[in-house]
Amino acid sequence: MKKLICLLGVFVITLTMSISVFAGDVPEGLLYEDNAKVFLGTVANYTTKDIPSAPYTIIDTVEVIPTEKIKGDVEIGVKETYSRCHSSLELKSDTEYLFGYFDENNFYIYEIESRNDGRFKLVGSDDYDMTMRFEEYLNDGLYADAEKERSTIGLEVTLSEYMEAEIDIAEKVTFNIGGNRYEIDKDAFFKLADEIKVENVKNDALKQPDTGDNSWQENMIFITVDLKEGHTVYKGEFPFAMAAISKYGEVSHNALEMSLLPSKDYQMEIEDVAKLYKLLPLEVSEKYVEPTVEEKTELNNRNNVIVGVSVSILVIGLIGYFVFKKKTRR
């Protein structure tokens, strides 16, 4: 029973580890990937390896004892071992470090220069853009916010709530499709955005149509809501609200502001995507091709597999619990 539960757990993890993150996108990957971990901890032990082409020794594996969780499934005080560390630091057992992890190939160690009033200063943040961005997101509370958002998987909000946009503070609404921009009737958009529900789902890669390298761009509506002067969203960062929506109903925040490809953060009904297209000029909306039955089935299967396996684990776990309980009563 335990082996079966463990195997199913590994299957779920394998299915969900599917968003590509590139070397320069580490801070953004740690932010948007639901499986990512950001935490503080101490080093219990580590090994190194020499690479002839590298001018320094590379850390191979490291045993870490977490002391404070910022984001992710982290157990305080429970030793964890990581490999393929992207670091050449000389680690000390009596020093607290900041760690970032989002898959077996991406584990990063950051040296803390100082921490005052909850704000970090990381070694190298003045010299390296990637470290500077990580420090900035950390101090702005974005990783803590991502952890809160991660805890609401399965909950629904309206599209306007997702975008943090309200008609009273909106100046204009623009749709960008295939590089062409169209101004949309503001009242009509918000009437629809206040009705359309989007569900927070486990982050995943977008479904890729078989129509070319840039097909994901051509199959998405990039929505921008310019706000009236003096108004901002996303913790005061932007004077506009945004979202990217694929023709399959996949909804993403990060398509316009980050170098990452869009990822599926939320999901809406495909029928609601068609309603959004109807807001466009006729010569554009009539080009919208609803996903085929096969594509809809494939998308539903992708959405249902994780749910189905998770339910199976829950059921098997409950059965195991009651079997164990029954045996202990005898």
Image (cartoon, rainbow, N blue to C red):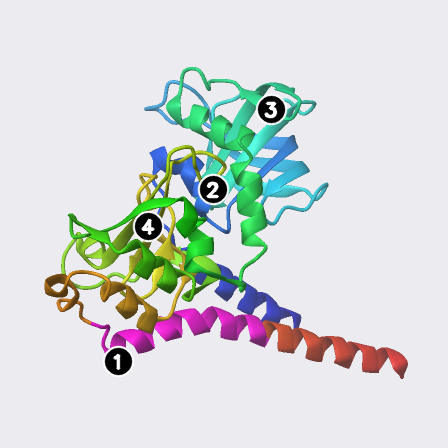
Q: Secondary structure at mark 4?
A: loop
Q: Secondary structure at mark 3?
A: strand
Q: Which mark is residue 31?
A: 2
In the rendering, at what x and y percent does residue 175 appear? 24, 52
Q: Give the vertical position of 177 relative to 77 (above or below).
A: below
Going 30% across and 75% down the picture, which residue do you hit?
296
Is there CB contact under 8 Å for labels 2 and 3? no
In the rendering, at what x and y percent does residue 215 appear? 18, 56
Q: Which mark is residue 262?
A: 4
Going 42% across and 42% down the picture, which residue do you hit?
29
Q: Which residues are magenta?
A: 290-312
Going 16% across and 52% down the picture, which residue do you hit?
178
Mark-to-mark CA distance, 1 and 3: 51 Å
Q: Give the vertical position of 54 relative to 190 (above or below).
A: above
Mark-to-mark CA distance, 4 and 3: 29 Å
Lower position in the chain sequence, tag 2 or tag 3: 2
Q: Which mark is residue 132?
A: none
**Residue that badge 3 annotates:** 119
Mark-to-mark CA distance, 2 and 3: 17 Å
Q: Give the vertical position of 76 relative to 111 (above or below).
A: below
**Residue that badge 1 annotates:** 293
